[in-house]
Image (cartoon, coloured by chain):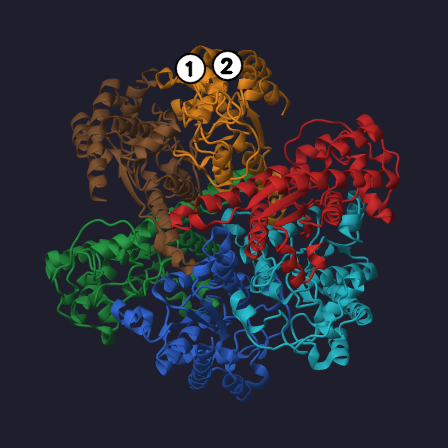
Chain colours: A blue, B green, C brown, D orange, E cyan, F red
Amino acid sequence: MQLQLATWPEVESYLTRSQGIIMPIGSTEQHGPNGLVGTDAICAEEVAKGVGDRTGAMVAPTISVGMAQHHLGFPGSMTLRPSTLIAVVRDMVESLAVHGFRRFFFLNGHGGNIATLTAAFSEIYAGASLAPASGAAANMPAIRCRLKNWWEAKQVGALSRELYGRAEGSHATPSEVSMTWAAYPEAAKPMTLDPEIAPSGDFADAADYRRKFPDGRIGSNPGLSSVEAGQRILEAAIAGMAAEYESWLKDA
Amino acid sequence: MQLQLATWPEVESYLTRSQGIIMPIGSTEQHGPNGLVGTDAICAEEVAKGVGDRTGAMVAPTISVGMAQHHLGFPGSMTLRPSTLIAVVRDMVESLAVHGFRRFFFLNGHGGNIATLTAAFSEIYAGASLAPASGAAANMPAIRCRLKNWWEAKQVGALSRELYGRAEGSHATPSEVSMTWAAYPEAAKPMTLDPEIAPSGDFADAADYRRKFPDGRIGSNPGLSSVEAGQRILEAAIAGMAAEYESWLKDA
Amino acid sequence: MQLQLATWPEVESYLTRSQGIIMPIGSTEQHGPNGLVGTDAICAEEVAKGVGDRTGAMVAPTISVGMAQHHLGFPGSMTLRPSTLIAVVRDMVESLAVHGFRRFFFLNGHGGNIATLTAAFSEIYAGASLAPASGAAANMPAIRCRLKNWWEAKQVGALSRELYGRAEGSHATPSEVSMTWAAYPEAAKPMTLDPEIAPSGDFADAADYRRKFPDGRIGSNPGLSSVEAGQRILEAAIAGMAAEYESWLKDA
Amino acid sequence: MQLQLATWPEVESYLTRSQGIIMPIGSTEQHGPNGLVGTDAICAEEVAKGVGDRTGAMVAPTISVGMAQHHLGFPGSMTLRPSTLIAVVRDMVESLAVHGFRRFFFLNGHGGNIATLTAAFSEIYAGASLAPASGAAANMPAIRCRLKNWWEAKQVGALSRELYGRAEGSHATPSEVSMTWAAYPEAAKPMTLDPEIAPSGDFADAADYRRKFPDGRIGSNPGLSSVEAGQRILEAAIAGMAAEYESWLKDA
Amino acid sequence: MQLQLATWPEVESYLTRSQGIIMPIGSTEQHGPNGLVGTDAICAEEVAKGVGDRTGAMVAPTISVGMAQHHLGFPGSMTLRPSTLIAVVRDMVESLAVHGFRRFFFLNGHGGNIATLTAAFSEIYAGASLAPASGAAANMPAIRCRLKNWWEAKQVGALSRELYGRAEGSHATPSEVSMTWAAYPEAAKPMTLDPEIAPSGDFADAADYRRKFPDGRIGSNPGLSSVEAGQRILEAAIAGMAAEYESWLKDA
Amino acid sequence: MQLQLATWPEVESYLTRSQGIIMPIGSTEQHGPNGLVGTDAICAEEVAKGVGDRTGAMVAPTISVGMAQHHLGFPGSMTLRPSTLIAVVRDMVESLAVHGFRRFFFLNGHGGNIATLTAAFSEIYAGASLAPASGAAANMPAIRCRLKNWWEAKQVGALSRELYGRAEGSHATPSEVSMTWAAYPEAAKPMTLDPEIAPSGDFADAADYRRKFPDGRIGSNPGLSSVEAGQRILEAAIAGMAAEYESWLKDA
């Protein structure tokens, strides 16, 4: 169930049977010559919806703009400062905690969010742990946050390797581009890229990134993307993430 | 053109012909017994997409969680603290300004955002105006931000009055609920409400709101909502906001 | 009673009979060729004192510098960033709440403060509403904040129309300039202005404001100001705001 | 000249002959059984006005609420958090720097402000010094801030000792209480205090303060206050501070 | 060369031949029954000093308190909120950038710092990348930050496996405990632990951590620690990190 | 006992007999031609360790980077913005308060820290005092913070006067330089300075400081420093500070 498509009495009812919620988070940033600026947000949202359908979990609205400073060298890329994103995650979690949500499963679609999101969890926990200084510690509800990247599902890794081998790369990958085309077939832009496989390596800030990766891709050939592959990868990601969510919810 | 569904070369090309962008902003909050929690985000997004289609304007990803402290008494409502939302708007505008965007038209779907969004514009302007203290003032690009609520289109007001008269009310209105049903017909929840028209009045914080408006509505009867009305209202809002955007872009 | 002119035992005594307080807030910004930089602060303070005298309400010290980014193009104008003003209002309210004050009536003299002040109220409420995350929600006192602009008193509107008609305008109005002259007759600067009535219209930031309104006025002719008119307008504003305060205090 | 009572063209003219401005800052806090809550703000404001009259310096609006956490045990006391006061001082200085002010003489009426105000100066300087990281350092205007407490004038010390000897104490002193009575004779509250001279000593936070100094005074007997003494002390403070301001402005 | 043990003319001279600096960062947190609270800070500092000696690099003062919210269930553990640590890292880097340092190699001793430190780098880069909004972008110096954990040196991994096999674990490891004993032999506390090898697994916040790992260790047997092993591991870490630093400095 | 060299069970045991802790804080900044950049941190740390040894008090890790904006004109100097340092002190105190520490004795080695540190104490107290707004005030533990500069010990003043007379000065003094040489004899840099005694006077920001004090010293002749003098001064400072700590702990 998507929170945005539920009424408040439906949310109230949901909370009598579960305290868990899926929090999709993506990014708005360049994805190479033929990948969509919204790729990471679309992938996180599509997988999250699928997990919600399969497990009955509530799905929060997608955080569409994440931490993407390093992509600012390319038009259309947007970023929140890490300190801003921390505040956003804190406010969203604290809002839902008012109603009784306690288990927050962040389904992430962008590697650049991992550090800030992990820091945000600690910021939330620290707000509660340091509360004894104001005498309020004893009553703190046991909020727990979890971060999983959809591509960590082992089904996804196997499929990506099978489909693309070393052309998968690490940014603007054919797997993620395919998944967005499965969601928005009208946005598919088949293209032969030159070089076929983009360069790889480390980078520091946005200027450094653009210098090293002039068309935005890292190590990938998204020219191999297809709607059909996207459907298969989406299905694998949903299966893997649904299992992750259910297993975590049981243990946490 | 939706930014999320564009590639970076397409954004680069767009910037050669326009410096304007539509920034839809909504909220995630209760909308009465049969309205969707995502109503304000959905309405802003649907109108923004329509304006983008009609005018050729770029449309940024929707800010789905806004300032809705006063709705926190109802399950599922989420809020950003005003100080957080100010930071989000600043970072989004500053990111897009890196690429050359200069005219930011915030298409708003939630009355509770108006104050904070207006404050955010001043925060952005102040960051630049106070820059002489660090010597950087002279080179500041002329960023301008504009806020318009979709329901301010005069076509919308006329249509709402014709369709619902005094049952329109001011929160969880049949107009906005209808518009979400037009976008998501499967989420439509026809219902007879009791009382038919909800109480009206002022409120302070979330506790005060819930006490005065026990089912979440203010002055409205969203039981009158329909997909068909939603389509007409959406069309009116798009026409009105497209004219607003084009007129502002020409003058600003 | 002005808080600044009371002793602490007098404040203690006051709190046994009322939990309300008037919070005057103005601005320090240009008011055209013959209006005072302190106009908005002076007006708010004078009206607040009068309301305090008439109703017996406590009156807090005036917030003299508000949100006036858009006036920074003119020498002497000062602004707080919106995020700073939010923190100021929060700290002032929380300080007074320590002693038992619960109803905060912000008597405002500057349109540019409205958005940020409204956001500040939500920031205060959110601090309390989101408290369940730290377990402290249950004990929150019911603080309520209210914003009223002195010119909203219907007696004031009627009188301004009678005295100045369309020469009233919207910034550096003869009504507000007159009121400051009534308070500080030695600062009165009778003057014939050219053009008599200033241009009107929208504006974005400080640079845009100065370009469109070169002497600082918007739509007004403060050349018509007089001490005598100021006395009448002040009296009307006090009467209107006293009624607003008492009515709100009873209901809130 | 008081900024609040000047027009913007007058400020523009002033800036052609001086870049200096007096910034009065006080506090809103208990001052014992017969001292006013506004004592520190009133004293700073009265001395600043006198210095302005004598030297022709511009005088900014008074910062009425300062850092007074330690007085929160007494009704009516208000504080800004130090971090808030730092932001206020930064914004005020940066606003005035837009217009060309460069020398900021903070005329302080409250010991509790000294630490935070000094920190605020460093925050402002650091904002500029650390600017090379964003490449803007070279153009920074040479802003300088200075803090002086009115009671540091040697004329004041001599007079206080002559008038009150060891009954002067360190909080709610007869000197400062007298000065407020000179400004507001109607607020004078002659009173015999018990004990005549309040206890002295160190304190930590507000609770500790109230425990050690049950009526709010520290080491003083404000029962000795008088309007006439206040006039003499005010005159001494003005003379001393005017000399300080002019000497600093010449050297800085 | 340690910055703390250099004079400013020596630093000035250093900058004529290198723009690089080693920034050691650790943590202050429990390390099981016989490990030191300062383990992570000591290890980072000792390795950094060794790297400085070997490569001639300048070594900044150690950040001793890091992000250790999850250890707050044990006496003596300290944490900075992630938002605080981000500000600390930003200020330290920006300070050193004033003098001409451009390459910041953070030598890290605590896994819990990785996310926040990575976010801090992005916060610094974003401050510069978003600068075009204030017109200052063009002059930004090319600051680069790098994070390496001392245990990532491949020499260290090989040695740890040889010495401790699966008793190494992941918190309060015999390798790190040994290294601190090598630095402070008087603090060595040989001990037989029960169980010999601590439990392993995931955790959320501090309360969860203490519940799952009652004596503070995760998966390790620090009972196997020794001064002699510490000397060998320290040597391996210095060799590995010196190579990392020099290689990065050449390429970056 | 140094916290860094203790295990958590040792800290737990310490807390059964004392709630006090020594918090050394220094600075990283130029100290003239032959003084160490780390002088202030080294002095605070050495004195703190000595006090810990003498009194049995726990000693926290040293805050090595303080508020030193005014030294940024000299290579190697580092500063935290005052707002950052306030956050660091708050987090450190609140962390230790979780475990039961209640008396925080900041042993300071740098005059430039005094204002910000004092402000930080008020920020911590204000966080608790303003808590009634969220209903949590009643349970606040009585945290108390104290600031003492090691050079305030009367034994130190007497010895400095005896050893150096008017050559002591106020920055890069022979007393502090000697103390660092006592701790790190290998870093001693005997030198004849020209002029022997540096100029004295006031300063504003970093640029002003460098202009007035071209080699970094103020009023001092650190050419007179020696290891042997350092040992005597260190001993005097330890004796004085140990007495201060014990006396305060008994009374507070």
* Position in image of residue E175 (x %, y %): 74, 72
- Mark 1 belongs to which amino acid? Ala
Asked if the residue at tag 1 contacts the one at tag 2, i.e. Cβ–Cβ closer than 8 Å, the answer is yes
Subunit ID for the residue under disc 1: D
* Position in image of residue E197 (x %, y %): 66, 78
Subunit ID for the residue under disc 2: D
* Position in image of residue E74 (x %, y %): 59, 63
The answer to whether residue B138 is seen in the rendering is: no
Which residue is painted at 56% across and 11% down in the image?
Answer: D162
Q: Which mark is residue D233?
A: 2
Q: Is residue F19 above or below residue F172?
A: below
Q: Is residue A3 above or below residue F81?
A: below
Give whichever of D158, A107 is nearer the camera: D158
* Position in image of residue F22 (x %, y %): 66, 47
For label 2, the SS is helix
Q: Which mark is residue D182?
A: 1
Q: Assign the N terminus of chain F to one quadrant of the image.
A: bottom right
Q: Earlier in the sequence, mark 2 or mark 1?
A: 1
